[in-house]
Structures are given as C-alpha cells and as structure tokens.
Amino acid sequence: MWVIKWTTLSEKENDYFEIQRSYDGLEWEYLGIEDGNGNSNHRLDYQFNDLFPNHGVIYYRDSTSRL
C-alpha cells in the first residue's frame, strides 16, 4: 500500500480531488476521490491510500472539482 499525501494552502469552491495513477505517465486510471473543504485560507493536509499498487515507478496526479 502507498499513502499519497498533499497539502493546500488555500481552496476556492473545492468539492473534491480525483486521484489517478499511471505506470507510464501517458495512460491514467481512476483510483478514487478525496473530499475537498470548499473554501479555506489556511493549510489543509490530505492523504489517499493506494491499496493495490504494482512494483516499479508509479505516477500520481489529482484534479479538483468545483462546487
């Protein structure tokens, strides 16, 4: 299991983060979502667990969805 962690310093109308994984940096697969906090002007820490990663290099990315 890998634990993916990230931090925001502010958020505007952030509904959720969509987490994706890739083994080659070209093809991405959906892993799940982590709820955002709407609006904030302070540091917020997040984490998401990748329960079934393969061996080797793994790329992760997230995208936000607005309210």
Image (spheres, rainbow, N blue to C red):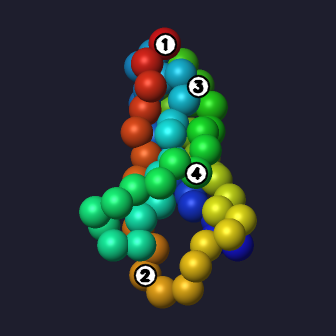
Nearest the eye: 11 or 25: 25
Mark 4 or 1 closer to N-term? 4
Question: What's the distance in space between the residues labelled 3 and 4, CA to CA?
Answer: 20 Å
Would you place residue 51 above or below residue 17 in this image? below
Nearest the eye: 34 or 32: 32
Amino acid type, residue under disc 3 in the picture: Asn
Q: Report helix, strand or loop for mark 3.
A: strand
Q: Which residue in the structure is indicated by mark 1?
A: 67
Q: Which residue in the structure is indicated by mark 2?
A: 57
Q: Which residue in the structure is indicated by mark 4?
A: 31
Q: Is residue 59 left or right of residue 26?
A: right
Amino acid type, residue under disc 1 in the picture: Leu
Q: Nearer the viewer, mark 4 or mark 1?
A: 4
Mark 1 or 3 closer to N-term? 3
Q: Residue at x 34, y 60 (%)?
A: 27
Residue 37 at what x, y percent from top left?
59, 25
Q: Residues within 10 Å of mark 3 (few under 14, many from 20)?
A: some
Q: Report helix, strand or loop for mark 4.
A: strand
Mark 2 or 4 closer to N-term? 4
* Residue lying farthest to the bottom in this orientation: 56
Q: Is residue 20 left or right of residue 35?
A: left
Q: Report helix, strand or loop for mark 2.
A: loop
Disc number for residue 37 = 3
Question: What's the distance in space between the residues labelled 2 and 3, CA to CA?
Answer: 30 Å
Mark 2 or 3 closer to N-term? 3
What quarter of the picture does the N terminus occupy? Answer: bottom right
Q: Nearer the viewer, mark 1 or mark 2?
A: 2
Q: Residue at x 68, y 69 (%)?
A: 52
Question: What's the distance in space between the residues labelled 1 and 3, CA to CA?
Answer: 10 Å
